[in-house]
Image (cartoon, rainbow, N blue to C red):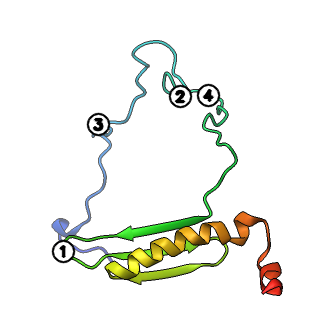
Amino acid sequence: MTAPADPTLKSLTDTIDQAPAAGLRSVPPAVGVPKGVAEGVPTAPLPDQQQGDGRTPIGWLTIRVPRRGTPTATSWCACGRDLFASGHAKVLALSEDHTAHRDACPLRTGTTISEGRAAA
């Protein structure tokens, strides 16, 4: 194949006379030597200063009362108890039952669930 006869149809070639594009240059630090971490940040992890007394919660009673709505409650325990109540009277009854369960819970009394079932 031959080149076109019209010189305006030829492709333009890059010119070497152009200045190079602006490049990034490294800027020296304004003051002092570059640091690995920010000032005031400890470089070694500190021990946990909030050590508890060894107790962990095993049961929760959650009561929700929306404005002008029906109150609801959930009683949950790590032993497997998961109850729900809706309405004023049922929420009060579940609250009392949750308090009674705290004294009878097998996780708090030291008996296992299977021992409690065998005894029943």
Pointer 4 or 3: first along the chain: 3
Q: Quote the CA–CA distance across marks 1 and 2.
A: 53 Å
SS of the residue under disc 2? loop
Between label 1 and label 3, give the one nearer the viewer.
Answer: 1
SS of the residue under disc 4? loop
Pointer 1 or 3: first along the chain: 3
Circles 4 and 2: CB atoms closer than 8 Å: yes
Between label 4 and label 3, give the one nearer the viewer.
Answer: 4
Pointer 1 or 4: first along the chain: 4
Q: Splitting the image into 4 quarters, where does residue 58 fall?
A: bottom right
Circles 1 and 4: CB atoms closer than 8 Å: no
Task: Residue type at mark 2: give it.
Answer: Val
Q: Quote the CA–CA distance across marks 2 and 3.
A: 39 Å
Q: Which residue is mark 4?
A: 43
Circles 1 and 3: CB atoms closer than 8 Å: no
Q: Is residue 53 above or below residue 44?
A: below
Q: Splitting the image into 4 quarters, where does residue 108 fall?
A: bottom right
